[in-house]
Amino acid sequence: MENIKQKIRSYVAVNDTDLEYSLQFYRKISLKKGAFLIRPEETVDHFYFLEKGCMCYYREDDTGMKVMEFFTAGEFFTDLYAYIEEIPSSSFLNATEECILYAISKQDAEKSFDHSHDLERFGRLSMQDGFMQLFRRNNQLKNLSNQERYVRLLQKRPDLFQRVPQYLIASYLGLTPVGLSKIRKRLSKQ
Amino acid sequence: MENIKQKIRSYVAVNDTDLEYSLQFYRKISLKKGAFLIRPEETVDHFYFLEKGCMCYYREDDTGMKVMEFFTAGEFFTDLYAYIEEIPSSSFLNATEECILYAISKQDAEKSFDHSHDLERFGRLSMQDGFMQLFRRNNQLKNLSNQERYVRLLQKRPDLFQRVPQYLIASYLGLTPVGLSKIRKRLSKQ
DNA sequence: AATATTTATTAAACCAGTTTAACAGGAATT
DNA sequence: AATTCCTGTTAAACTGGTTTAATAAATATT
């Protein structure tokens, strides 16, 4: 739990008693490569902290799969939309490799927020952080070409290209495997 | 200020004393049509509540302008990215029509959050709301065709088409005025 | 009312992606 | 070692948008 502690304390100065109060609720989960944490129609009433591994957050519709995000170690995550709205998920959360994570129920998370003003603030600030992440992504989607997005991802998260198949990355970038292949070729000869 | 009160109370049950504490900080601003609330390079240290009118939130780069959002009456808003990160704005906030709004400084907003656990919670929940809004938008951008997005916008915010020029809407939908015009034509003959 | 300005449409040429399908290499399974 | 499955590349035809430029319609200004 050391990493969760650190993560929370990176947002807010909270005393040990309050922190331990919250930490008591987390329970450990192990996932094998390829396992699903969440599938469409399921209820999303937990928040997760990724201790180790990589999770792929995506949806599927008639036109195929769309990767929304890759979560890697040290991040809090969940299917936030379904979690907040308390509606059945319409997404997948899939372990692209062996994962260890800690889970807290929404009920217990809110208990923590009730219990301590500092923890409530942690909730606010981490939500702010999630917003910023999404905002940046949204901006890239809107302002950059596919090729630019590919190049940036390569710079910013080179690890992903080692651990995740290229067709998932293509989807994350908003194109087909064929499209990404073309971009890579185009880049390779200049 | 009645509308702000109502808006805050839609998020959280807060007593009159705490609410008034926060409300004391807001000051009224009037904007003429075409006026700028925020321009690139400016500091964004206020949060706003739109009492009346419509604000267009957009950026400009070498390839032209990109509309990110239209805010209409009853919404809290600001250039959230610059506000949170405390960096100079890289966006515009422009009044597309005559506007009345209320402004609270970041300092005073945080004072409110310090002052009351309930107000802190309001901060968390409204941030959550902003996240959801962005999430939905992001999803539409990723999962729908331009035509579908146009049709949905038409259904969901028909008022926009009355009050905002079409080339801004085109930009909001992620295409050029020419592109939108083609879509409209295509739709009109079936 | 006449003029200037802004906004929307249309046409033509173009382009970065798509879809479909064939193929090749690597990893996992038998 | 042979087979199957999974992943990535390539080619060909296609498509929904783009850019540029001309024109038309609506709005604001004089």
Image (spheres, coloured by chain):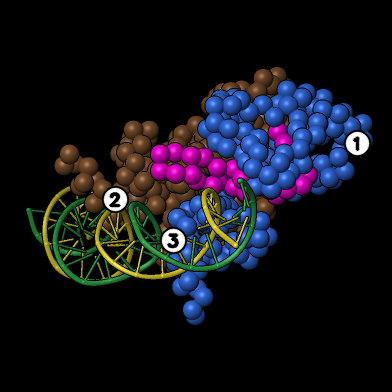
Chain colours: A blue, B brown, C green, D yellow
User: In this figure, which residue is indicated by the disc labeled 3?
Assistant: A179
**Disc number lying in front (2 or 3):** 3
User: Residue drawn at (76%, 30%), measured in percent from left and top?
Assistant: A104
What whole-number distance in Å separates the C-alpha atoms at marks 2 and 1? 55 Å
What whole-number distance in Å separates the C-alpha atoms at marks 2 and 3? 25 Å
What whole-number distance in Å separates the C-alpha atoms at marks 3 and 1? 51 Å
Task: Tell me if residue A33 can be seen.
Answer: yes
Identify the mark nearer the N-term, 3 or 1.
1
User: In this figure, which residue is indicated by the disc labeled 1?
Assistant: A15
State which chain disc 1 sits on: A
- The residue type indicated by label 2 comes to Leu
Instruction: Give left or right: position of C25 versus B119.
Output: left
User: Residue drawn at (57%, 37%), measured in percent from left and top?
Assistant: A92
User: In this figure, which residue is indicated by the disc labeled 2?
Assistant: B180
Q: Which of A16 and B48 lies nearest the eye of the viewer?
A: A16
What is the x, y in percent for residue C6?
Answer: 29, 56
Q: Is residue B63 above or below residue B131?
A: below
- Stretch in magenta: A47-72
Q: Is residue A36 above or below residue A52?
A: above
The answer to whether residue B83 is magenta is: no
**Disc number lying in front (3 or 1):** 3
What is the x, y in percent for residue A35?
Answer: 65, 39
Q: Are marks 3 and 1 on the same chain?
A: yes
State which chain disc 2 sits on: B
Mark 3 residue element = helix
State which chain disc 3 sits on: A
Q: Residue A77: which quarter of the image?
A: top right
